[in-house]
Amino acid sequence: MNILQINSSARQGANSTRVADAIVARLTASQPSANVVLRNLATEPHPVLDEAALGALFTPADQRTPEQAARVALDDALIAEVQAADVIVLGVPMYNLGVPVQLKTWIDAIARAGVTFRYTENGPEGLLKGKKVYVALARGGRYRDTPFDTQVPYLRTVLGFLGIADVSFIYAEGLNMGPDAAEQGFAEAEADIAAAVA
């Protein structure tokens, strides 16, 4: 089993990373031979999708400048990691009710027409089928199943667009609401992990 862990927090030692690490630990405990690839988007920031990147992507490969080829190669590396993974673990903190820019940049890099999805006469079709995703959510407040939770609908939609339908969300909430609330939040996350990782 190949596991890809994506840490998207802007800081080291983040709560979302703690929960993602716990998920990976549970997975590898049952699969000791599993191969784990870790990508930390804080220490290895990926360039944003800008006009230069779009120009490179829309230029035929044999006509790209060396700079354009190098830019596309950065995205290719992320796509290859996702394609090789059987299981993906996303560490996702909540920033201002949304996902971190680091995660959005990663999504922009791996969502490529003709590679990870394609357009058909019946609409878009995701090409990253057969993968399992665990999303480790860390929030200072409590937003689960409320209108303020924009992360879960967005991630479920974008992962589904790429062909990934098997997604489990692990919640660590109330982490900034005092020590007792934080302890409860991590305990709830542990319970979610135990239920999700059979």
Image (cartoon, helix red, strand yellow):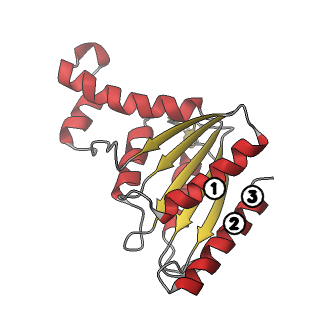
Query: Residue 165's mark?
Result: none
- Residue 84 versus residue 65: which sits nearer the camera? 84
Q: In the displayed structure, would residue 151 be above or below residue 117?
A: below
Q: Nearer the viewer, mark 1 or mark 3?
A: 1
In the displayed structure, 131 sits above or below 174; it is above
As helix, strand or loop, the secondary structure at mark 1 comes to: helix
Upstream in sequence: badge 3 or badge 2: 2
Tag 2: Cα neighbours inside 10 Å, few (<14), some, or many (≥20)?
some
Q: Which mark is residue 196?
A: 3
Q: Which residue is mark 1?
A: 22
10 in relation to 148, above or below: above
In-front residue for pair 133/127: 133
Tag 2 near tag 1, CB within 8 Å: yes
Q: Give the number of the disc on residue 190.
A: 2
Q: Position of residue 124 (x, y in %)?
A: 53, 42
| Amino acid on which disc 2 is placed | Glu
Mark 1: amino acid? Ala
Residue 163 in picture, x, y percent from top left: 60, 43
